Image (cartoon, rainbow, N blue to C red):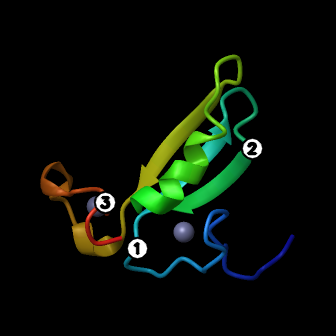
């Protein structure tokens, strides 16, 4: 397994600790299909994989700065 920091499959840049991450997994196996920044640009690429007939599960990961106040979090859509 690679120990390099993961990169966004859309823009190919690394994830920073304070960035939101959107991870796509195979619904049945749980295998990671792709990881993306929460930015609209990067999520648009993720959306291409979410086609009918393919069971994928998308999960948002919040950075520590979001703390316990996730209800007010914009999901990184504005700040990236
Ligand atoms: Zn990206
Ligand atoms: Zn957040």
**Residue 1 image position (x, y, % from top left):** 87, 70
- The answer to whether 36 is drawn above or below residue 63 in the figure is above
Question: Residue drawn 41% across and 57% down?
Answer: 40
User: Looking at the image, do the residues carrying marks 3 and 1 touch, with CB atoms under 8 Å apart?
Assistant: no
Q: Quadrant of residue 55?
A: top right
Mark 2 or 1, closer to the camera: 1
Disc 2 or 1, which lies upstream in sequence? 1
x, y percentage for residue 63? Answer: 36, 70
Q: Residue at x 48, y 82 (%)?
A: 16
Taking 7 as reference, is 50 above or below it?
above
> How packed is label 2: few (under 14 Cα within 10 Å), some, or many (20 or more)?
few
- What residue is shown with label 3? 77
Task: Pinpoint residue 50: horizontal percent, then vertical percent.
Answer: 61, 33
Distance between mark 3 and mark 2 Cα atoms: 25 Å
Quadrant occupied by the C terminus: bottom left
Judging by the rendered image, the residue that carries numbered circle 2 is 31
Label located before the other in sequence (3 or 1): 1
Disc 2 from disc 1: Cα separation = 22 Å
Quadrant of the rendered image containing residue 70: bottom left
Residue ID at (20%, 57%): 73
Q: Are marks 3 and 2 in contact (CB under 8 Å)?
A: no
Q: Measuring from the top left, give residue 46's x and y in whole percent.
A: 59, 48
| Local crowd size for mark 1, using a 10 Å CA cut-off: few (<14), some (14–19), many (≥20) | many
């Amino acid at each position: 397994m690679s120990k390099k920091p993961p990169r966004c499959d859309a823009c190919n840049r690394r994830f920073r600790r304070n960035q939101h991450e959107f991870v796509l997994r195979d619904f049945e196996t749980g295998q990671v299909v792709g990881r993306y920044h929460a930015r609209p640009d990067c999520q648009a690429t993720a959306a291409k994989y979410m086609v009918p007939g393919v069971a994928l599960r998308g999960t948002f990961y919040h950075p520590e700065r979001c703390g316990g106040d996730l209800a007010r979090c914009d999901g990184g859509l504005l700040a990236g």
